[in-house]
Image (cartoon, rainbow, N blue to C red):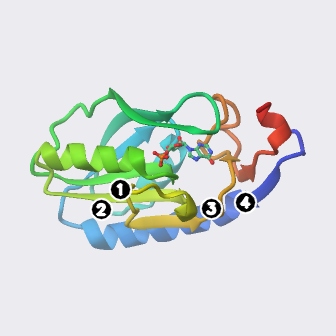
């Protein structure tokens, strides 16, 4: 942190919220042997905390998709760069994402998993920017925090691969984006 970023959500606040999300997911998925799919790279920090807050057995998997280049504006087009290792057919899938922005990435992944025969697909996102939702964009079933239309970094979220390791969620000032 350079000290210029505005902290929106402290690490403590995030920890408390993730614990509650874990409880909710435990109640919803006990006995269902869910597959928790982490959307790389941004969700990895949230995912690691979330799965440890879930008290029923879960299996891990990872996908990578991108709708952003290295800037702050979505390209609008989603690419799958890494598929799950195990088949999702017949599984209860929980897609774990850092943030739902336009919702295009998650709409694409949800559609893909349902086409592949997943029994159910739920979305759990640390952050939600509902004002940015595109037509046909996905809605999250479990949300940590709803935020305004600001570009944020930290807790896994990056700007051009930087700031992912900040423990808090902070707003990135325009002068740091050089755009
Ligand atoms: P969507 O498909 O537009 O919902 O984009 C989702 C992806 O865009 C997220 O997984 C993030 O990687 C990226 N993204 C959207 N908003 C932000 C932000 O405020 N900070 C960092 N990354 C963001």
The residues bearing labels 2 and 4 have C-alpha atoms spaced at a distance of 27 Å
Q: Nearer the viewer, residue 54 or 68?
A: 68
- Does mark 1's beta carbon lie closer than 8 Å to ligand 1? no
**Rendered-image quadrant of the N terminus:** top right
- State the residue at coordinates (10%, 48%): 117
Q: What is the secondary structure assignment of the residue under circle 1?
A: loop
Q: Residue furthest front?
A: 135
Under circle 4, the secondary element is loop
Residue named by callout 3 = 14
Identify the residue position indicated by label 2 in the image. 56
Whichever of callouts 1 and 4 sits on the residue coming sooner in the sequence is 4
Left/right of residue 67 with respect to residue 154 in the rendered view: left
Q: Is the C-beta of the residue carrying label 4 under 8 Å from the nearest atom of ligand 1?
A: no
Which callout, 2 or 4, points to the residue nearer the camera?
A: 4
Mark 1 or 4, closer to the camera? 1
- Which badge, 2 or 4, is on the more N-terminal residue? 4
């Amino acid at each position: 942190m350079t000290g210029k970023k505005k902290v929106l959500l402290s690490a403590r606040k995030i920890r408390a919220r993730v614990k509650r999300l874990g409880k909710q997911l435990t109640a919803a998925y006990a006995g269902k042997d869910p597959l928790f799919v982490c959307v790389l790279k941004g969700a990895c920090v949230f995912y690691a905390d979330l799965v440890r807050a879930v008290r029923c057995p879960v299996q891990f998997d990872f996908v990578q998709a991108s709708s952003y280049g290295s800037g702050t504006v979505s390209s609008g087009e989603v690419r799958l760069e890494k598929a799950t290792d195990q088949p999702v057919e017949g599984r209860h899938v929980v897609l774990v994402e850092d943030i739902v922005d336009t919702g295009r990435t998650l709409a694409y992944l949800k559609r893909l998993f349902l086409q592949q025969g997943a029994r159910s697909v739920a979305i759990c996102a640390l952050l939600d920017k509902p004002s940015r939702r595109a037509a046909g964009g996905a809605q999250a079933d479990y949300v940590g925090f709803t935020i305004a239309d600001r570009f944020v970094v930290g807790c896994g979220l990056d700007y051009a691969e930087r700031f992912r390791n900040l423990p808090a969620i902070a707003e990135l000032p325009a002068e740091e984006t050089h755009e």
